[in-house]
Image (cartoon, rainbow, N blue to C red):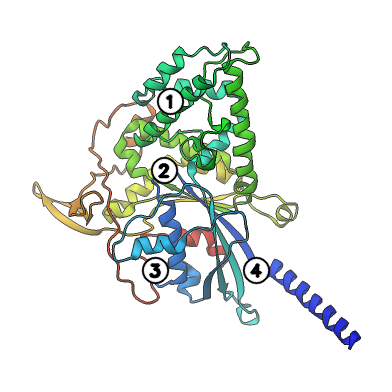
Amino acid sequence: MVFTSLADGVMSSVESAASGVSAALFDRPLRLGVTGLARSGKTVFITSLVANLLDRARMLQLNAAREGRIEAAFLQPQPDDTVPRFDYENHLAALTGPSPHWPDSTRAVSELRLSLKVRPAGLLSGWQGPRTLHLDIVDYPGEWLLDLALLDKSYAEWSQDVLARIANRPQAQAFLAANTQAVPVGTHDEPQAQALAAAFTEYLNAARAAGFYDCTPGRFLLPGDLAGSPALTFAPLPPEPGAPRGSLWREMERRFEAYKAKVVKPFFRDHFARIDRQVVLVDALSAIHSGPQAMEDLRHAMADILSAFKPGRNHFLTRLLGGKRVEKILFAATKADHLHHAQHEAMTAIIEALTREAQDRARFAGAETEALAMASLRTTTEEMRPHNGSELPCVRGTLLESGKQAAFYPGALPEDPAQLLTPARQGAESWLEGDYQAMAFAPAPLTLKHGSGPPHIRLDRAAEFLIGDAL
């Protein structure tokens, strides 16, 4: 019996080891990063994507779903025990419940694992059984992603850049006044440092509300448990090469370096550097509505975001040696349901032009990129309305503020994106032609059929680009 027990133990160990090797070789984990700047719809994107992968009737442009090769899908605990779970169930209930409303926005890193059992395609499909793809979806604020650009800057360089960029912004005048009164080479005074940091934080919040995107450091907007810490108590000051030890300038510099070392680098190491595929959500409609300066600021933000990525193909040796590259990057202009479908092609052209520099850089490094206009959750219906002897392509939905139904025409987007990007690059204060408007719609009440996820626009095409080859 002793020998039998030992033999059973050995066989059990062998089977466990074989199972582990099989899982490592055939049950692929694929990490999909989801980011975007404020109000771009990250939470809704993840919620709708997962719901539509669980119930795939609306995913016709996802080849594996259309061909019926996805045999099963289920949620299971994410592999990172120290990362909060993305609150999928409550977010879905908010969007599809009796009184639908938008869920809370992304405020920290979260993760969700969706496992898909897929039947292989091709000539050898009859000889192979189904395999499992573990899709690890990582949600993180785009403001944190912009912080990665700080790693290559000194405090003096960052301060000079920020102060030059915000000099003429109305939202920054209170902070600039306080900054002028400070004495950088004087002895560090903590109340003064806190007052400067608070004024700078107020500016960042006001700038984001006004449609600007270069609002770094990102943790000033989403501090979490770091609120009030020295790592979040600094502000840009004019460069002072000879500032003595113990001065306000040197203390601000020390805290800036601490922010990079203790906040930005751990985020990069623990989360960002492990991403395989990435989607960057862009609220381009709001930027257009805010005017040329916000549009140009968004273009710079997109370039800064991509500079944080390490694009390229993940070859076998790259994975084996521990390196990771972002293989695919999707730039998605969200809220396409705020436009009649007749304008979707123009919106796609705008997001293509807006991210052109970022895409060219990624493609040169070997990554695949794509840009499209999409809506993770469709909240409107389309209609044509007579106006001055012509027909206007409108959308109808429930207004977020009043709860009333309304038809909305945002203005005609130009077919040539240069009509927007050129005046933005030239520093125009307003659009010379066209009056573009943005409207906030509430999610519409839904009655979902069995097997169908929430209605969307091109979410299936986005999924096909991001994970279709892995299925």
**Secondary structure of the residue carrying numbered label 3:** loop
How many residues crowd mark 3 within 10 Å: few (<14), some (14–19), many (20+)? many
Which residue is labeled 1 in the image?
A: 199
Is 344 rendered above or below residue 422? Answer: below
Kindly indicate whether the residue at mark 3 contacts the one at mark 1 (C-beta within 8 angstroms): no
Mark closest to the chain's N terminus, 4 or 2: 4
Mark closest to the chain's N terminus, 1 or 2: 2
Which residue is labeled 4 in the image?
A: 27
Marks 3/4: CA distance?
25 Å
**Residue pushed farthest left?**
389
Q: Quadrant of the C terminus?
A: bottom right
Mark closest to the chain's N terminus, 3 or 4: 4
Marks 4/1: CA distance?
50 Å
Horizontally, residue 12 falls left or right of residue 394, namely right
In front of the other: label 4 or label 1?
1
Residue 247 sits in quarter: top right
Q: Quadrant of the N terminus?
A: bottom right
Marks 1/3: CA distance?
45 Å
The residue sitting at 71% across, 67% down in the picture is 25
Kindly indicate whether the residue at mark 2 contacts the one at mark 3 (C-beta within 8 angstroms): no
The residue lying toward the viewer, choosing from 20 and 363, is 20
In front of the other: label 1 or label 2?
1
Residue 376 sits in quarter: bottom left
Image location (x, y in percent) of residue 176: 42, 19
| Whether residue 236 can be seen here | no
Marks 3/2: CA distance?
25 Å
Numbered badge on residue 453: 3
**Secondary structure of the residue carrying numbered label 4:** loop
